[in-house]
Image (cartoon, coloured by chain):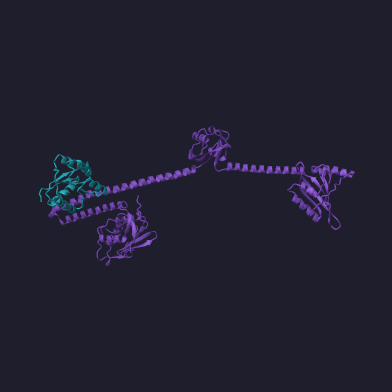
Amino acid sequence: MSERLLNFLLVEDDEIDVMNVQRAFKKNNMVNPLYTASNGVEALSELRRGAIPTERTIVLLDLNMPQMNGLEFLREVRKDPRLHALPVVVLTTSDLERDKIEAYDMNVAGYIVKPVTFSAFVEVMATLKKYWSLVELP
Amino acid sequence: MIRPNPTQVIERPASDEGRLRDELERLAHIGSWAWHVAANRVTWSDELYRIYGLEPGSIEVTFEAYLSRVHEEDRPRIVEHVQAALARGGAFEYEERILRPDGAVRYLRSRGEVVTDGAGQPVRMIGTCQDITVEKAAEEHERQLLSERIARQEAELAQRRLRELFQQAPAAIALTVGPEHRFELANPAYVQLSGRDPLGKTMREAFPEAQVFLTLLDRAFATGEPYAGQEMPVHFAADDGPGQRWFNFVYQPIRDGAGRVYGIMTHAVEVTEQVEARRAVERQAAELAQLTRALERSNTELDQFAYVASHDLKAPLRGIASLSAWIEEDLSDAASPELRRNLDLLRSRVQRLESLIDGILAYARVGRSNGHAEPVDLEGLVAETIDLLAVPADVEVRKATALPVVTGTRTSLQQVFQNLLGNALKHNRAERRWIEVGAREHGAAWELWVGDNGPGIAPQFHERIWGIFQTLRPRDEVEGTGIGLALVKKIVEGSGGRVWLESEPGRGATFRFTWPKNGGIERFL
């Protein structure tokens, strides 16, 4: 098993949700680098200027955000020749059918509705980590 | 049969008395004759010869000679009369037409008498012939005058009828003549409808404001083609009535004997009331459609609002839940039991608030699900639901009847049974718990029920339980959001059915609802 760690980029505007992910990482003893951006604009510019690695990075994307929401961010990413192959997992509170369809139209790797309780959230993160460590990435 | 002897002797009166008689006969246009039957010898007076257009004494007269001068059509009748007179005796009278040698027809009235011998045998016949041609002609003239008068009266009557028809017709009728359309006739309905008497005037003079109609009249006159106008709006200049009036009318070109158009008949019926009534209906329909659209819009907005509200309400809720968990975690051993209990309570309230929000969302979504109406086998659906609810082993599930296949949205029907069966389980504290499910036909609908032997519900609550967020017991005792029955009611009523409850405290409860057989079309806007 190649021990090059996966990077995670969390695009999330809610401070508590960011803490949620951070604490879940800690609880699961995940040492993977976790980058955060509070909206799509910030995430895009960080990715483009190389502050966040674009290889072996899984994007955890919230949908409802100010300035540039998740779907708009996704559209920009898929148009960008350097970023278009980024694996993106939507992590949102929205279970609107419309959002799901639109997200999958833009080739998301998954769509997860945020569980309410922290313990459930910890589970979700553990499963995500386990899954992505199985996946071969270029 | 009379078989007269052809040998005849003509008696000629020669005395003064004879001459006097002759004069008198001439004055009276009466001739006389005598017929010796046995000898078949007939004598005619001079006047009789003259009546026949003959020189007196110029022919020998026999019965046959007489008969040959009678009009052909009258001969059989004359023969009959004479035979009858000979057989019967006495007097007789008839009229006949005779032909003069120049072809002139004369009308005669013949009177005669049979003279018999002692044995009653006819010996002679005598009689007179009066020339009544002049009287006949006068009579004929009279008859002709009479029939002419009758014909004239009939014609007048027919004309009067026609005029009455024209005057009293429940439609405006007018006749205009010539290329200028001069009004020759206009019935009272026309005058009343148009509000003026156009007689003698041209169309342009009578209706200077009606340019459109003038054009149409011109065209009908020129082409000979009738024009029919449907619901034409007409504005009369000097009109006190409704501002706008509508007419159905026909311009019918009228042709003379040679086929040339000489005028146009106008036939018009006012249809203002009908048009206005229809417009009112159309207006109402448009308003209704607009209302429907507004309602659809507001429902969509409500749906979106419910979604957004519940989404946005849940976000901070999740934050509170997470924070409370972290606080407890971070305090670890330092947390007192009381603090832990309070944090537990905090989280349970968060849970409840979340359930309530989910409830609102579910309620708002009823009828908007993506499901479509399909045949649903309730046997299978109820079995699945019982599985899903994880009914404890000690609860007896009774099937009172077989369950039908109904038409409806699968998810909606599942929600109905899930809530009713769930309630039956949740509140039941009986020693031997049972749930009963059944169905029966109820006219055009199925009546379905879910019964239990739980605590039952007092009648004063039977209405209230269907309201949203209504619970009968403290939430700490039985976890419930009070949305379930509201959801059931909304689904069932949306499908054209109804819900009701039969229950007494301590006697269990039976929730019943109907579901139309024709598919339970979900009638949500």
In this rendering, is residue B501 above or below A54? below
Above or below, B520 against B201 in this view is below
**Farthest right residue?**
B16
Task: Give the quarter of the figure containing the N terminus of chain B.
Answer: bottom right
Instruction: Please name whichever residue, B182 or B311, is drawn nearer the observer in this view of the structure.
Output: B182
Query: Is B385 located above or below residue B306 in the figure?
Result: below
Q: Which of B193 and B41 is in front in this view?
A: B41
Residue B341 horizontal side relative to residue B122, left or right? left
**Residue B366 can be seen in this image:** yes
* Residue with the most extreme front position: B7
Q: Is residue B96 left or right of residue A134?
A: right
Residue B94, image x, y percentages: 77, 50
Q: Where is residue A91 in the image (x, y as percent from the top left)?
A: 20, 48
The quarter of the displayed image where residue B23 is located:
top right
Front in this rendered view, residue B69 or B173: B69
Measuring 36% from the left and 46% from the top, which residue is drawn there?
Answer: B293
Q: How many labels does the image show?
A: 0
- On the question of residue B312 being in view, the answer is no
Chain whose colour in the figure is cyan: A
Chain in purple on the image: B
| Image coords of residue B20 (percent x, y) | 87, 43
Q: Position of residue A46 (x, y in %)?
A: 16, 41
